[in-house]
Amino acid sequence: MPFIDWDSVPSREIMPGFHGQMIHTDRMTLSRWRIEAGAALPQHAHPHEQITTVLDGTFEMTVAGETRTFGPGMAVVIPGNTPHAGRAITECRVLDVFQPARDDYR
Amino acid sequence: MPFIDWDSVPSREIMPGFHGQMIHTDRMTLSRWRIEAGAALPQHAHPHEQITTVLDGTFEMTVAGETRTFGPGMAVVIPGNTPHAGRAITECRVLDVFQPARDDYR
């Protein structure tokens, strides 16, 4: 800290096809994902607020029953405890931020 | 919400050369910036924690006395109340997240 080289952050396959790098701060977790085409995130919820941004590629998300397919032109805001699911239409690079920090990803 | 098209978010020139779009959630503010080459952010501090990511271009930041020039390969974590300054070496696109939300940017 404060300058963190992404190349120094280990990548872990958190779920099949979801390769994530995590930066945990006092109050947030920033995660950078490489997601394989077709990889799917089953519906789940967590108390953390989440904002998702696609850096490149096309991703599909369902949040609170609404489904959208999107790329870098959109941000997705997922309030705490809100059911959401996702699927990579193409290989994607995605940036997520969670508040508070995702202690379960440490 | 939850799906926000960046094209629907107005851009404001918050400081000379810093064109920002803001998405405020319950707990965070996500801001997307287009910064003109040479535009400079004087040293300042705020109680919000901040994470800065360069999407493209080259930016220089000084955080707590340490100066680095960087592009998309780095994330910068600025704890609350930590003095920081910045300067766009080239035109940049930058994504910042603040916690809590930046009510002063509403």
Image (cartoon, coloured by chain):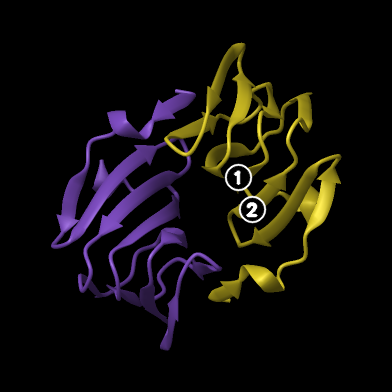
Chain colours: A purple, B yellow
Q: Which residue is mark 1?
A: B94
Foreground pick, B9 / A63: B9
Residue B69 visible to an observer of this rendering: yes
Q: What is the secondary structure assignment of the residue under circle 2? A: strand
Q: Disc 2 to disc 1, how far (Cα)?
A: 6 Å
Q: Compared to B21, does A30 lie above or below? A: above
Instruction: Name which residue lies at 69% across and 48% down.
Output: B34
Instruction: Name which residue lies at 60% across and 20% down.
Output: B63
Foreground pick, B62 / A90: A90
Residue A101 visible to an observer of this rendering: no
Left or right: where B17 falls relative to B2:
right
Q: Which residue is mark 2?
A: B32
Foreground pick, B88 / A30: B88
| Whole-percent x, y for residue B4 in the image | 59, 73
| Whole-percent x, y for residue B3 in the image | 54, 76
Binning the other alpha carbons within 10 Å of mark 2 as few (below 14), some (14 to 19) or many (20 upward) gives many
Instruction: Name which residue lies at 32% across and 42% down.
Output: A22
Name the residue type under label 2: Arg
Q: Compared to B30, does A61 lie above or below? A: below
Cβ atoms at labels 2 and 1 below 8 Å apart:
yes
Q: What is the secondary structure assignment of the residue under circle 1? A: strand
Q: Tell me which chain the residue with mark 1 is part of.
A: B
